[in-house]
Image: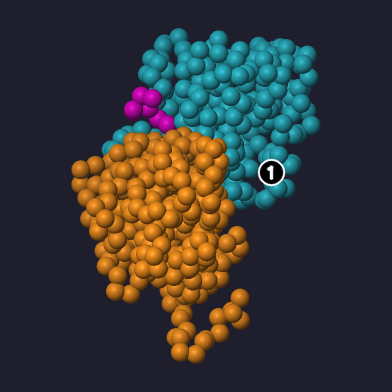
């Protein structure tokens, strides 16, 4: 793998830096720890809210809640199966646990516990997980490329992939108002602020057309909506008019909005997701459109079905086609 | 203890016999079931439901009840038998065991059955849920306790030991675990699958109050429940119950030991007869 990352002249060679490198571009507007602050806000009026973590309180922004409500914060140790089993037990006693870890550990290590003790019993547990998709350069151990596929396949589970800080702040009270298990991908630390410029409001289960355009429809979730919006600007300067439909709720999918937008004639439909090409938003949209008898020209921007490399995030996002430049380049190629 | 105990209430011996009868009758209805396990754990369940636990038969979700988490979901036939004896499930429902649309599926599931507080079957889940319930009850200031039953085979699951450490770490003195040591797993004797002895020393080293008893000796089981209840140190409690598969039905006690023992169609009546004969002797 590393042989392909030789330094090219004039271009600084990047390093992996840290497990939790920021996904914010240099100079981008950000907001610190939106989940932690929103949870504190929520907890002020909802005494049943408790916070649980498996030795990753600081790295999931739950430390902010812990500081404000120390007696409502439960450190469960580095034991993810216990974390979600115990969260189920607390929910059975009437509490609303927000239980955090990294996406890889919830989806891969604790899957059966979440399946059986939370989803099957329809417990009111909010599973909030950092490092979704490819947001760590640390290698496959910390890259949750398949989390959406796994949680989509689980009955009763609501699955959410937020774009930015503005959206995360709104998701927290929205999922609290929904009784039942929720898996929410988390962006933590200095989180990009994007959607505030678009007058955006999050509604559970609803997609939102952030930008309209005649030639291309990009359907995206999570950080790929941020990338799609940037790519759309780049495409516009090349005379390509791209729409962006943001789909933060992966399950249940907003069929109506997808049908309305993808059903418009003569647009290339591209689904962009920070997730393996298997089993995520792209395949969900494709299957739904097939079932509905709508057959646009369809392309996917997603992570490949392979173990991803370690490295600096900008390098990896370029390599795997999810950087702004790569999104724009691929779309231009498909339009040719 | 049930809140409507009568002066003429049956003895624990009779309760245990009735639980065994209920289990055998369900086995007969379906022609199969984890009957050897049900027979081995009937004495423990009799003590739990007629000596150790607080509950209201007419109100299975009564807030102040003691919780009972059946981690080994395949023991559902045994718990249904106890729930019927406790008046939580009507006796007539016994005829529906394992049939389509029944509230009594083969493996215990929380959403199906009154008095079933978790969905077991995938082994190793119960103690983690119990930790969360124990924390939740303390947070509410509740005096209720969490009982959880699991099997020696479940000790193979790493998650059990996560929960053991956690229960002690959080000083869950409202948690009482019961381990059924019948030394039988799917592939053979538990101790040959993955050695778990010395169990008492292990559990004590993990910070638990431990009582190990003959799980088919009612007096000993009562004493263990009492010791676990009256213990005053801020630590979780565990009763290790050594049991005999098929207990109470001599020809099943002697049957070749298997996780899922075969009982021929004509043998169910015979088993009930042996149970009754044993009770009269």
Residue at 40 percent of width and 53 percent of height: A214
Q: Magenta residues: mostly which secondary structure?
A: loop
State the quadrant of the C terminus of chain B: top right
- Residue B253, given in percent of the width and then of the height, sits at 73, 27
- Residue B136, given in percent of the width and then of the height, sits at 35, 41
Which shade of the palette goes to chain A? orange
State the quadrant of the N terminus of chain B: top left
Confirm whether the magenta stretch covers residue B62. Answer: yes
Quarter occupied by residue B38: top right
Front position in the image: B48 or B63: B63
* Lateral position of residue A304 relative to residue B114, left or right: right
Residue at 61 percent of width and 19 percent of height: B100
Q: What stretch is highlighted in magenta?
A: B61-69
Mark 1 chain: B
Residue at 74 percent of width and 42 percent of height: B187
* Lateral position of residue B267 relative to residue B152, left or right: right
Q: How is the image coloured?
A: by chain
Q: Mark 1 points at which residue?
A: B190
Q: Which chain shows up in cyan?
A: B
- Residue A33, given in percent of the width and then of the height, sits at 29, 61
Quarter occupied by residue A20: bottom left
- Decide: few, some or many residues near mark 1? Use Cα within 10 Å; few <14, some 14-19, many ≥20: many
């Amino acid at each position: 793998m590393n042989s392909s990352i030789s330094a090219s002249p004039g271009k600084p060679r990047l390093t992996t830096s840290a497990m939790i490198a920021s996904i914010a571009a240099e100079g981008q507007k950000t907001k610190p720890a939106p989940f932690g602050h929103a949870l504190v806000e929520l907890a002020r009026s909802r005494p049943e809210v408790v916070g649980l973590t498996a030795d990753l309180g600081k790295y999931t922004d739950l430390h902010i809640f812990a500081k404000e409500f120390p007696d409502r914060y439960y450190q469960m140790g580095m034991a993810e199966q216990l974390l979600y089993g115990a969260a189920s037990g607390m929910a059975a006693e009437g509490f609303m646990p927000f239980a955090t870890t990294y996406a890889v550990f919830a989806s891969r290590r604790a899957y059966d516990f979440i399946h059986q003790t939370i989803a099957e019993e329809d417990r009111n547990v909010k599973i909030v997980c950092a490092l979704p998709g490819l947001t760590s350069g640390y290698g496959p151990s910390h890259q949750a490329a398949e989390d959406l596929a796994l949680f989509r396949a689980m009955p009763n589970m609501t699955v959410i992939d937020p774009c930015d800080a503005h959206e995360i702040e709104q998701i927290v009270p929205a999922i609290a108002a929904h009784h039942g298990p929720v898996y929410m991908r988390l962006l933590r630390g200095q989180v990009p602020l994007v959607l505030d410029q678009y007058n955006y409001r999050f509604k559970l289960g609803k997609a939102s057309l952030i930008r309209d355009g005649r030639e291309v429809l990009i359907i995206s979730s999570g950080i790929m909506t941020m990338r799609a919006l940037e790519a759309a600007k780049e495409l516009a300067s090349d005379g390509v008019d791209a729409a962006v439909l943001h789909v933060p709720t992966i399950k249940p999918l907003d069929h109506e909005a997808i049908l309305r937008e993808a059903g418009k004639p003569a647009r290339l439909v591209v689904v962009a997701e920070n997730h393996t090409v298997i089993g995520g938003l792209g395949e969900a949209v494709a299957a739904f459109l097939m079932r509905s008898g709508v057959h646009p020209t369809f392309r996917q921007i997603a992570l490949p079905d392979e173990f991803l490399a370690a490295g600096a995030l900008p390098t990896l996002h370029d390599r795997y086609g999810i950087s702004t430049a790569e999104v724009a380049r691929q779309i231009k190629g498909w339009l040719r | 203890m049930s809140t409507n105990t009568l002066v003429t209430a049956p003895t624990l011996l009779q309760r245990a016999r009735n639980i065994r009868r209920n289990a055998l009758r369900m086995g007969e209805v379906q022609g199969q079931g984890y009957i050897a396990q049900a027979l081995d754990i009937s004495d423990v369940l009799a003590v739990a439901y007629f000596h150790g636990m607080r509950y209201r038969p007419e109100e299975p979700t009564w807030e102040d009840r003691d919780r009972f988490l059946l981690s080994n979901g395949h023991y559902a036939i045994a718990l249904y038998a106890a729930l019927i004896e406790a008046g939580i499930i009507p006796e007539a429902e016994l005829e529906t065991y394992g049939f389509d649309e029944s509230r009594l599926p083969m493996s215990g599931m929380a959403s199906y059955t009154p008095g079933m507080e978790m969905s077991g079957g995938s082994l190793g889940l119960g103690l983690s849920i119990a930790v969360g319930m124990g924390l939740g009850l303390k947070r509410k200031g509740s005096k209720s306790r969490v009982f959880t039953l699991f099997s020696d085979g479940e000790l193979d699951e790493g998650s059990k030991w996560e929960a053991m450490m956690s229960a002690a770490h959080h000083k869950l003195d409202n948690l009482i675990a019961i381990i059924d040591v019948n030394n039988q797993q799917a592939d053979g004797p538990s101790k040959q699958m993955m050695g778990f002895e010395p169990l008492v020393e292990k559990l004590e080293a993990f910070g638990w109050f431990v009582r190990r008893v003959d799980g088919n000796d009612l007096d000993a089981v009562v004493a263990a429940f009492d010791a676990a209840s009256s213990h005053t140190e801020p630590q979780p409690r565990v009763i290790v119950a050594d049991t005999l598969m098929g207990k109470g039905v001599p020809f099943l006690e002697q049957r070749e030991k298997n996780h899922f023992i075969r009982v021929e169609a004509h043998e169910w009546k015979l088993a009930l007869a042996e149970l009754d004969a044993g009770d009269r002797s």
